[in-house]
Image: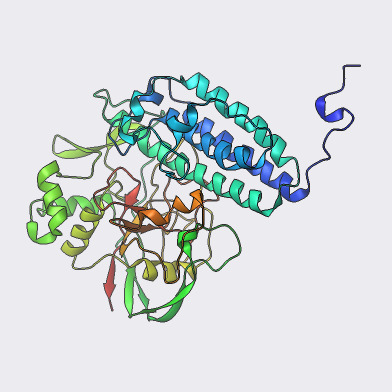
Amino acid sequence: MPPPTTTETAGAPAPAPPAEAALASRYHAVRDLTETLAAPLGPEDQTVQSMPDVSPTKWHRAHTTWFFETFVLQAHHPGYQPFHEAFGYLFNSYYEAVGARHTRSDRGQITRPTTAEVGSYREAVDRSMGAVLSADIGEAVDELVTLGLHHEQQHQELLLMDIKHVLSCNPLRPAYLAGAPARAADPGPAGWVDRPGGIVPVGHGGGGFAYDNEGPRHDVLLRPHRLADRLVTNGEWMTFMADGGYERSDLWLSDGWAEVQAQGWQAPIYWEPVGDGWHEFTLAGRHEVDPHRPVVHVSHYEADAFARWAGTRLPTEQEWEAAVAEQPYVEPSFTPTDPHPRGVTEADRGPVRQAFGEVWQWTSSAYLGFPGYAPPAGAVGEYNGKFMSGQVVLRGSSCATPPGHARATYRNFFPPRARWAFSGVRLAADA
């Protein structure tokens, strides 16, 4: 007989309780998905930083590992020794309470550690986390691990956003994945969902995970309004462009018009003119723009200008949440080999279609704390609250949002100029 394995020896830890076993299973599933998303990329791909807002794939893999090492292992696993004394400096993102960090815009200069060494770092931390998760970890550690998993899921979407921008800067326009996106079905004319207004509750009310910025739950007064029953399509955006949408200053907020002039915007970020039409760079390479797919990769400035051109407006985040929360939630499909907005499908439920799994939807709401909001104590309190200035809220989820990460109360946020996110447009109007 072979010698007994570690778990068979005397004094081995007892099997993890069901709750810890479920968390351990989820931990490994989330961590494995990050590696699946990185697998199509070579070491050279994983080191490039194409603009200050983009982080290299290698950095995402290391930073999410640093999060577990710093907030779980070093704080709650006695005797743990950091994998490398310099990694805390290299892979801290913005946690001032934890210590100094490498400048964000210089992350692409970190050629060492190599991608292989980052892989070894992930494996070592995962082994130590396995020991933690095999025991009765307690509520505080459970919450930290759960936060860390949702944090990693955010970075999984960022990984796809960022590598798309990186590859788009290559004159060869190489594909992250092979194969052309399937053509979408014609969604037909957009309809309107009438909403009566009134006093409605918004915000997370407990039961399941939520970020601190999703609460407290509170009542708001909504005026009667209408929401478009689907997202704005590429075809509709081309009509906006043909009507001088990027040339008419009367359609734009002042800061938005300044950005148009400074950056020379003429179309969404990944569109390129080809003959009399347009091609779009996707994660599957460059293809002809599909007029029936939702427009994606537009800034808040562009979304607002389009709404103004259409004689409508963007919804507030409270209008969006109140409508979508009344519908049954259906987990969108997520396939790592096909992260593209699909268009209206049979899976859409409720009168407000395409709420999840297509594109994040810009709202007209500034990203601020809800009434009574206070960030948690300690370093994890820097996760959301410190960014409540100069940002705009987006709602829903996108084709790149991993499974189990979306909900009606989720508050995503970006600066109004941001275009590289999987962001699109749903219109609203006063009743």
* One can see residue 383 in this view: no
Residue at image point 38% right, 46% down = 341
Residue at image point 51% right, 42% down = 152
Q: Position of residue 38 (x, y in %)?
A: 47, 29
Q: Is residue 185 left or right of residue 206?
A: left
The relative height of residue 409 versus residue 159 in the rendered view (above or below) is: below
Q: Quadrant of the C terminus?
A: bottom left
Q: Is residue 216 left or right of residue 238?
A: right
Q: Quadrant of residue 7?
A: top right
Q: Quadrant of residue 280?
A: top left
Q: Residue furthest right?
A: 1
Q: Position of residue 148 (x, y in %)?
A: 55, 45
Q: Nearer the viewer, residue 416 or 94?
A: 94
**Number of numbered discs:** 0
* One can see residue 270 in this view: yes
Residue at image point 18% right, 58% down = 305
The relative height of residue 52 versus residue 367 in the rendered view (above or below) is: above
Q: Nearer the viewer, residue 19 or 35?
A: 19
Q: Quadrant of the N terminus?
A: top right
